[in-house]
Amino acid sequence: MKLLLTPIVLLLFFLGYSGTPTRQITGKVISSSDGLALPAADIRSLPSKTTAKTDANGKYSIKIPITDTHIEVSFLGFQTQKAAIKKADVINFSLADDVKALAEISVVGYGTQRKIVTTSASQHLIAGSPGAAASYLNGRVAGLQVMNDVNNESYAKISENNFKRATDHPLSTFSIDVDAASYSNVRRYINGGNLPPKDAVRIEELINYFDYNYEQPKGNDPVNIVTEISAAPWNKAHRLVQIGLKAKNIPTEKLPSSNLVFLIDVSGSMEAPNKLPLLISSLRLLTDNLRDQDKVAIVVYAGNSGLVLPSTSGDNKQAIKEALSKLSAGGSTAGGAGIKLAYKVATDNFIKGGNNRIILATDGDFNVGASSDTDMQTLIEEKRKSGVYLTVLGFGMGNYKDSKMEVLADKGNGNYAYIDDINEARKVLINEFGGTLFTVAKDVKLQVEFNPSKVQAYRLIGYENRLLNNEDFNDDLKDAGEMGAGHTVTALYEIIPVGVESKFLKSVDALKYQKTSSSSNNTGNELLNVKMRYKQPDGDKSKLLQKAVVDNGGNLLQQASDNFKFSASVAMLGMLLRQSEFVQQGNFDTAIALAESAKGTDKEGYRAEYVKIAKSAKLLAKDLRNFANTGEGK
């Protein structure tokens, strides 16, 4: 009998038989402070110590022995929580912040280690100077969160705009920018317990993440110019000018037909839950929003590129979704070959007068083929002549290549968004469907002329990588930004009025061969003149719009519109995160108070979420200073 049983036991062993029955437990893990999902949280079943992790949406599923009694959840910066396993197969967790745990973590370069603070960083933090925590931020740190791998994310360096004297530089010229990727990326850092690298903070993208209640354009022009002036909240002696552009709203049913190509990165770097799986879910949302007259093709690229789905009508949503669901990640990244194929498919199915667009979804980690920023820029600049626009959707973290993504979108006559969760996908691809995908004005440029009898100096806040030469404004061959249906664009200028002393203005010797004067032909109260040029989406010749701006000097910040106060708050937070030398008397409390007073209707809750982000950023900055003050880790 024993001889008979032995082979059976061995067979059951090799087949993985376990004598203990199991059960499946599922649930979701969120932060109790803001209700946001916590991805990659550690799930452990006790006493068996079976483990799992939450996905990009904070959900988990774990198969455990039926003898286990508890589920334990832990996540960096939050208090570990344990729950008894009862009859229910769904156990949700809401984790509270653990400030003490965060304070035990500091950053070294792009990686992080426990209980280590460099001496120079500590000195900056303790000093409380304008560069407090600058060694962390200016050193392009990842933040407070412990990471197993070195952070290889890349961001183009930003040198902030300085103040310019109106007598020496009466004109300021730049291309508009409707991208909002920087805000959702910064939010991802802060929600993960990190302060972002300073070069990840593009202030104009933080400001333009939000919609503003500007007046609709009237007449035949697709864009309207709106302006407002008040005191700068970070320096009451300075003035702040808001220039807003509003593109006309077009009902979805009246938008032109779309010829879309989903260009999807399926390389090995896209395996993570917050990359390809989130990408697929995002594009499935967009598919649900397609009309019968729209069509979609799917191109993928890894070691090689290929056509997964030929151009398919929007009335066959099931075929599109099935093609998306079959995608999997693996291989290296031949981005250049994929882009070429996508443009070919788009041009083969071109709709005259329609919306012809490639939607590139990737983490930007191009490493095979045309991989340098210069090569990719040249390729995109050539391909955009076909009349096909490019929208770029960024996903993931750790090896995220923001610098490449921005180049592609800027040079491809398109826009750029960072998708950190499914709610952001809904915002970009559903709520802002028209603005994201349907261009109403292209090559939009702004040129502002300052009156030297009123303006001593001025500074454009943000837009550092969008600056143009003054002569570019009238050059219709010069590329600039695009505006989609319903889009708003906001730009802020900080102004030092004539007669106000400022540390930002250094004296120079009088010129020998020419006279300098602050006199002006304008003797009225005109502060500046705004000029805008734009082209129709299929046009080659630009049209000029302009508007003079008068400053009566009596505008109190408290009386300013919600549009003005909210954009000023976002600009201040951006300067604080960048540890800007221009933040002056700005602080987190003022930024938060301004935003709380300017939420307006906030139908989607984006402004309320911003307030939570600002409060979290304040706590993270405080944690850094407090940790340095304790002297621990030295």
Image: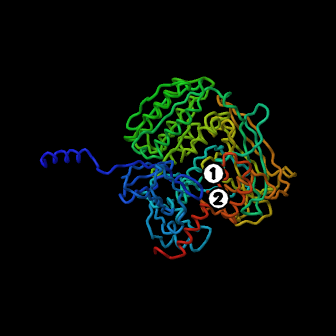
Q: CA distance from mark 2 to mark 1?
A: 9 Å
Depth check, front residue: 536 or 188: 188
On the image, the x and y values in percent for residue 581 come to: 63, 63
Expressed as whole percent of the image width and height from the top left, the position of residue 384 reads 55, 33
SS assignment at label 2: helix
Residue 400 visible from this viewpoint: no
Q: Is residue 10 left or right of residue 472?
A: left
Q: How many labels were placed on the picture?
A: 2
Tag 1 residue? 206
Secondary structure beneath label 1: helix
Question: Percent position (x, y) of residue 317?
Answer: 53, 28
Q: Is residue 311 above or below residue 84?
A: above
Residue located beneath label 2 in the image: 573
Residue 47 point in image, percent of width and height: 37, 60
- What amino acid is found at the position of numbered circle 2 in the picture? Leu
User: Does label 2 or label 1 sit earlier along the sequence?
Assistant: 1
Mark 2 touches mark 1? (CB < 8 Å): yes
Q: Inspect the image, locate mark 1, and give the three-letter code of the amino acid beneath it.
A: Leu
